[in-house]
Image (cartoon, rainbow, N blue to C red):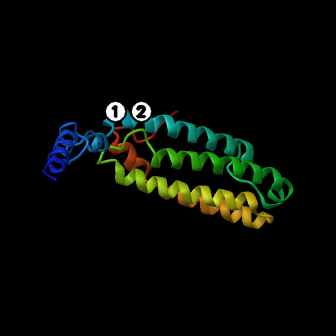
Amino acid sequence: MFKRIVVAATLLGTAWGLGLLGPASAQSRQAEERMTTEAAAEYFLDIRCKQSAAIYRFNESVFRGRNFIRRPEVQRRLPELRRYAGRLGEATYAFARRLVNPPKPWPRNAAPPISELATGQLELSRKRRVQLETKRASNWIRLQGSANELNGELPYSRVNKRLELPHTINC
């Protein structure tokens, strides 16, 4: 019995010494390791610019150089516009997924607005999915307006400030 206790204590002591147990374990140190502000800014720019490119393609394809699209044109082009919305929805979802799953945790000061941005992007992605599935031009137009409104409320400038990026980003 005594030998078993000694062996168990020795194994626990060895595991503790190797950092496999306890608060100072290698796993917990690795979990606490966060991206530096510079690394976070570089990662954010990379994924943000991919999202910006998808938005640019959507706007060029849908609006064709104008700032608006009229209802008769939406009715005529609805199958095509639905596909464009679906593609943008996929890109938006990928952006949100990358915000939620960075290579290392975000810097503490940037995490709250990034979390808010990711939540908003997931909502935008959902709106685009509904826009992809709609059969009526009026619904497509309503969802487009709703997506534009939501996108305008997202905290891009707060994220840029926390990551020490310029107010506007030109990719």
Relative to the observer, which residue lies in front, 50 or 7? 7
Residue type for callout 2: Glu
User: Left or right: where does residue 91 sit relative to residue 84?
Assistant: left
Residue at x-position 41% and y-position 54%: 115
Mark 1, Cα crowd under 10 Å, few <14 / some 14-19 / many 20+, is few
SS for dot 1: helix
* Tag 1: amino acid: Glu
> Percent x, y for residue 98?
50, 44
**Residue 2, label in figure:** none
Q: Residue at x 43, y 57 (%)?
A: 116
Characterize the local packing of mark 2: few (<14), some (14-19) or many (20 or more) Cα atoms within 10 angstroms.
some
Q: Quadrant of residue 163?
A: top left
What percent of the width, then of the height, locates residue 145? 64, 61
Q: Residue furthest front?
A: 1
Query: What residue occupies the far right of the structure in this picture?
Result: 76
Left or right: where 136 falls relative to 144 = right
Asked if 101 appears above or below 78 in the picture, the reply is: above
Q: Which residue is mark 2?
A: 42
Identify residue for label 1: 38
Residue at 80%, 57% (x, y): give it: 74
Whether residue 117 sits left or right of residue 30 in the image: it is right
Kind of element beneath mark 2: helix
